[in-house]
Amino acid sequence: MTDSTPTDVLIVGAGPVGLTLACDLARRGVDARVVERADAHPVGTRARGVRARTQEVLEDLGVLGDVTRHAETPLPTRFYDTEGRLVREATLYEAPPVPGAPYPGSLIVGQQFTEAALRARLASLGRHVELGAELTDVAQDHEGVTASIRAGGEPRAVRARYLVGCDGAGSTVRKLAGISFLGETWDRQRMLFGNLGVDGLDPAVAHMWATGTGGMVTLYPMPRSRTWFFTAPLPPKDGRDDAPVTLETVTAAFDRHVGLPGVSFRDAVYLSVYQVNIRMVDRFRRGRVFLAGDAAHVHTPAGGQGMNTGIQDAYNLGWKLAEALRGAPASLLDTYEEERKPVAERVLASTTARGKSWAGSDTARVSGRIVDAFRGRDPFADTSQLALTYRGGSLAVDSASQIGIRAGDRAPDARCTSPANGERVRLFDLFRGTHVTLLVFGRAPFPHLPAATRSAVRAHRVLAAGSSPDPSEPALVDSAGEAHDLYGIADSGLVLVRPDGHVGMTAEGPDAAAVAAYLRRITAADPSHPAPSRAERCATPVRPRTNPREGSDHFRL
Ligand SMILES: Cc1cc2nc3c(=O)[nH]c(=O)nc-3n(C[C@H](O)[C@H](O)[C@H](O)COP(=O)(O)OP(=O)(O)OC[C@H]3O[C@@H](n4cnc5c(N)ncnc54)[C@H](O)[C@@H]3O)c2cc1C
């Protein structure tokens, strides 16, 4: 049977990546469906670290408050050597906010809560996950894709303009699209993990024991779920050990590595086995089929980057799909792979190096490295993901040599004040939503844009402290000079911020032609690229652009 109502985007998989994409598309008025193979939502923890950049994305999506409510208080972690001697005690997840970033290096939130917050946001946007619906096949043509979905034992065909595989490491979408998952499996790195109750240990601290095999046994109290998060290395798979994981498996692993009398386990909520794979796709897209998250890249959990990287994939793709559906040039969608593939390559390289540096039974050395990584002093990469940049890509246009920030960089936050009432206004307040933002620093006139491109942009003047604003213009005063410092602007300049919070272009003056040309590349603003008519599309029409800050103090050019 074919579902009578086609959709714009079919998202396969309701993990954190599929849910992020679904929220982003829904708030942009795109008609998207999310199908999920499982019959129920996950109750266990995998990712715990919600990094600073991810917190910014979640704030923009309207989810951060809910996620933060489920954050655990960082606890001191005790590191023990293979003899059980205490070697170090330190609080992880303690990296404070850095200039230009309002949030700490990481929150500790069980992945099940992050997903629940995203689902709640999706519901508030009128959408929900279709549980028990498994994608089994995909075909595509010039107009769209036809997905075979098995739901409630019944096969169905769903027609969509685009399909995004957010279906995890074993991605069916990836296999059906014939996309290779290149890399290696670390046979000797298997891990038992899960959530359970523990007796006989101090719940005011987390515990990590070195093992002779190199990995660590971890027990981290997670009071929000009334469980402890447990990890322990497992021996390599020998082909005979497909037995279900039980409390006995946990006890055996703990006794083998730690053997602390008086510690016992109960009430397992979730137990699983994780095999380390270092793999990524050779392409993020085939035609109308895209991949995001673990479906596109997997690596060691060292430094907690997997979910965070996948959420950034979704955030990069969401606005591009929405604009493409409205009629933006098709080349915009090519920039998804162009921008995200190098990021995935870097994440694989840094997590591999970090994973190796965390191996070994020298607890003093290894624990020092772990603490450094969680405190923003990791030698391999910025685990907060704030330094992520798309510099040098085709969407990064620098025509200003006097401006410090470069096109492609993440646009930092800065605290300014409103000249109207003296209230604090953050740059992130201006960016929040689905639009492009133009920051006009100094006294340069606003660029006068052609009508076709105006509606995509909100412009704001950012004045240096002490300047008197023109009351007819929307302006902010950079009272502490934060914005000028962080954007590297001495006097005047223009910075265009993309809908995903990255700088798209910089210019020294009000170069309307350059701004308009840029907007025509990234939005549906060009009349020579009309949005497909309903008859041309195989999906329901995209609703008009939502405008969550309608009436706010911005300037339509
Ligand atoms: C022990 C452990 C600790 C981790 N810690 C961290 C951390 O601290 N920080 C971090 O960033 N990352 C961490 N990760 C990684 C993180 O959990 C993953 O990167 C993240 O879950 C990937 O999200 P995803 O949405 O891409 O895929 P998944 O979460 O795997 O979701 C994929 C979904 O697709 C569904 N699906 C699959 N096939 C189909 C189909 N054919 N049809 C319909 N639905 C389908 C699945 O049921 C699933 O719900 C950790 C992982 C592990 C195992």
Image (cartoon, grey):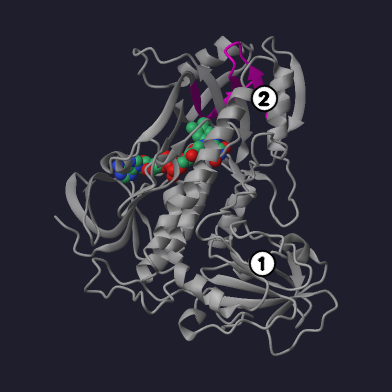
Q: Which stretch appears magenta?
A: 190-217
Crowding near pointer 1: few (<14 within 10 Å), some, many (20+)? some
The tally of labels here is 2
The numbered mark at residue 207 is 2
- Give SS at disc 2: strand
Q: Nearer the viewer, residue 525 or 292?
A: 525
Location of residue 305 by image quarter:
top right
Decide: few, some or many residues near mark 2? Use Cα within 10 Å; few <14, some 14-19, many ≥20: many
Mark 2 or mark 1: name the one nearer the start of the chain. 2
Look at 30% across and 53% down and name the residue there.
Answer: 287
Residue 400, numbered circle = 1
From this viewpoint, is residue 46 visible? no
- Amino acid type, label 2: His
Quarter of image, ligand 1: top left
For residue 530, say whether it is visible.
Answer: yes
Is residue 391 rendered to the left or right of residue 73?
left
Relative side of 544 to 557, left or right:
left
In the image, is residue 213 part of the stretch drawn in magenta? yes
Q: Is residue 299 left or right of residue 177?
A: right
Q: Position of residue 405 (x, y in %)?
A: 68, 60
Residue at the left extreme, as displayed: 1
Q: Which residue is pictured at 19% across the width and 44% down the height? A: 153
- Identify which residue, 7 or 496, lies in the foreground: 496
For numbered disc 1, what is the local secondary structure?
Answer: loop
Residue 525 x, y percent position in the rendering: 44, 76
